[in-house]
Image (cartoon, helix red, strand yellow):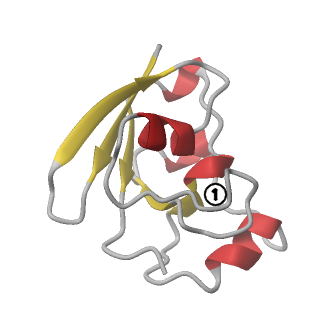
Amino acid sequence: MINITFVASDGERRKVEIEEGETAREAALYNDVPGIDGDCGGVCACATCHVHVDPEWIDKVGRLTDGSMEADLLQFAEGTTEFSRLACQINMKSILDGLVLHVPDKQY
């Protein structure tokens, strides 16, 4: 199992576990993490699973790729930063055990 900590905009931390091969979006939804809707079903079509990767983890997770579908969607999301990613595009692997993701105040 891989551990992820989701940090709400008010600072509340929620630690969850997920199987390798699942996504951070699935980890949030399976564990009822507030603020992650994932309306499109995880197909990178809605940006309702927007998260900010903790700066200490961004190199392991990877940054947005210019021109990608993910980058195109996030340009319309509220509160994006250089650490923004869609949780549906963060595939969980052992190197990400302990990952910290910050949930924005709003998803739209």
Helix, strand or loop under label 1: loop
The local crowd at label 1, few if under 14, some if 14 to 19, many if 20 or more residues have their Cα within 10 Å, is some
Is 108 on the left-hand or right-hand side of 54? right
Q: Quadrant of residue 66?
A: bottom right
Identity of the residue drawn at 50% across and 63% down? 83
Give the residue at mark 1.
63
The image position of residue 78, as x and y in percent, is 47, 84
The image position of residue 53, as x and y in percent, is 45, 54
Residue 44 in the image: above or below residue 94: below
Identity of the residue drawn at 54% across and 66% down? 48
Image mark count: 1
Is 77 on the left-hand or right-hand side of 98? right
* Residue type indicated by callout 1: Arg
Is 79 on the left-hand or right-hand side of 96? left
Most distant residue in the top direction: 1
The image position of residue 93, as x and y in percent, is 61, 24
Q: Nearer the viewer, residue 49 or 101?
A: 49
Residue 60 in the image: above or below residue 69: above
The image position of residue 106, as x and y in percent, is 37, 76
Identity of the residue drawn at 52% across and 71% down? 82
Identity of the residue drawn at 62% across and 44% down? 90
Q: Quadrant of residue 46?
A: bottom right
Most distant residue in the right direction: 67
Residue 83 in the image: above or below residue 13: below
Residue 19 in the image: above or below residue 11: above
